[in-house]
Image: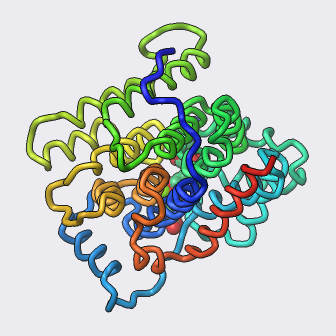
Amino acid sequence: MQRILPVMTKMDLSTLSQKFRGCMLGSLLGDCLGAPYEGDSSVSKAVLQQYFDKIEGPPFKAPIKQYTDDTAMTKCVAESLIDCRGFDPQDMAKKFVKEFFASPRRGYGQNVVRVFMKLKDQKCEDPFGPAKEQFDGAGSLGNGGAMRVAPVALFYHQDYPALIEKARKSALLTHTNKLGRDGAILQAIAVYQGLQSIPSEGIDATTFIKELMNKMHEIEDDDYGVEMEECRPYQKQLSVALDLLDADGSPDDINTKVCDLLGTNIAALYSVPTAVFCFLRALRPIPDIETENPFRRTLQYAISLGGDTDTIASMAGAIAGAYYGQSAISESLQRHCEGHAEVMDLADRLMAACNKP
Ligand code: F2R
Ligand code: MG
Ligand code: MG
């Protein structure tokens, strides 16, 4: 495979720490700030502008925005990687179950709850078993594996083959359908690429997507064992994203195409490439989104598309945070999100754990 991005040179620890925190906070903020709009068909850019301005403005004291299943599960993934110094399926499954039964009203996917119940009944003896039975054996194609995968990408950022393998296995605890599982792998690779890239050097959006397509080519061809166009759904969606980044037309027309072609729903295939697109589109100004801050622009744009707003903003936020680092994330936005201090602490412990010999 031809490499487009330079191979990661060793980053100094303070930059890496900023990026770990940025990624975890980005994931949290996208979830908390996007959750109030989840399920809306579209969200007015003017309303969102006010919403973000108020939350970011120092005089405004709003109630804390609650996180949802996206963060509840991301925290479990991070805790498990830290406690076990790597991926341990049984431990991770136990943490999912404990978290769900302690706090079940976090807006979990309707069907994944059945996996937690079965896991609880069998005390996580066979952590991969219950997920295989979902949807009459077809497995879930939802974005639940992707929405929580960021800590895996952080933990294994020095070992790309392990990153892919552990992203796949962590998804299989709940999502065995190829689309659900490969969506998690794509999101993990996008976070990895964000982490590798240096903001002062900039990102070329085309290069970023082509690199993702190259990497997904290996994953998808491996899945199907044949070289067929229709067997590369994620590569196809990424090429749509590439076209949309350069598309001519009014902002409304382009947004309609983004929603129609890339999608904003709960399926991984119609939300993970959308999150990647949001991150890349927000590298430059977007009409009707008034902020100089490209991290905030990423979240505001992702939420404006409507649909699965918490999850798409959370995934886009994780990629953006891994790229820009914590210093790009307004403290006021952070303070308005439930669990921000805890998530930052998890980022620090995750980094310490993965750097231990
Ligand atoms: N559940 C939600 N949002 C619903 C509204 C929440 C509301 N705000 C509230 O508070 O009550 N959001 C969360 O769910 C998504 C992640 O879901 P996950 O973990 O993938 O769950 P699941 O159950 O496996 O799949 C979700 C749905 O996708 C459809 N589906 C999946 N696989 C399918 C298959 N093979 N065939 C047919 N349909 C399939 C089903 O409708 C599943 O219920 C995130 O958005 C998170 O925020
Ligand atoms: Mg959610
Ligand atoms: Mg959601």
Position of residue 227 measured from the top left corner of the image (x, y, whole percent):
50, 8
Q: 22 left or right of 209?
A: right
Q: Quadrant of residue 46?
A: bottom left
Can residue 143 be seen by looking at this rendering? yes
The residue drawn where x is 67% and y is 65% is 346
Q: Quadrant of residue 341?
A: bottom right
Count of all numbered marks drawn on residues in the image: 0
Nearest the camera: 200 or 269? 200
Q: Nearer the viewer, residue 57 or 240?
A: 57
Residue 27 lies, in percent from the top left, at 51, 59
- Decide if residue 70 is in sight here: no
Is residue 331 shown above or below 132? Answer: below
Residue at the image point whose x is 54% and y is 21% from the top: 220
Q: How is the image coloured?
A: rainbow
What residue do we see at 42% from left, 46% from top? 198
187 and 270: which is toward the camera: 187
Question: Where is residue 345 drawn, in percent x and y?
Answer: 65, 69
- The residue lying at 55 percent from left, 62 percent from top is 21
Please state the horizontal and vertical placement of residue 178, each as a whole percent of the image: 59, 29
- 214 versus 57 height, above or below: above
| The image quarter in which residue 203 lies | top left
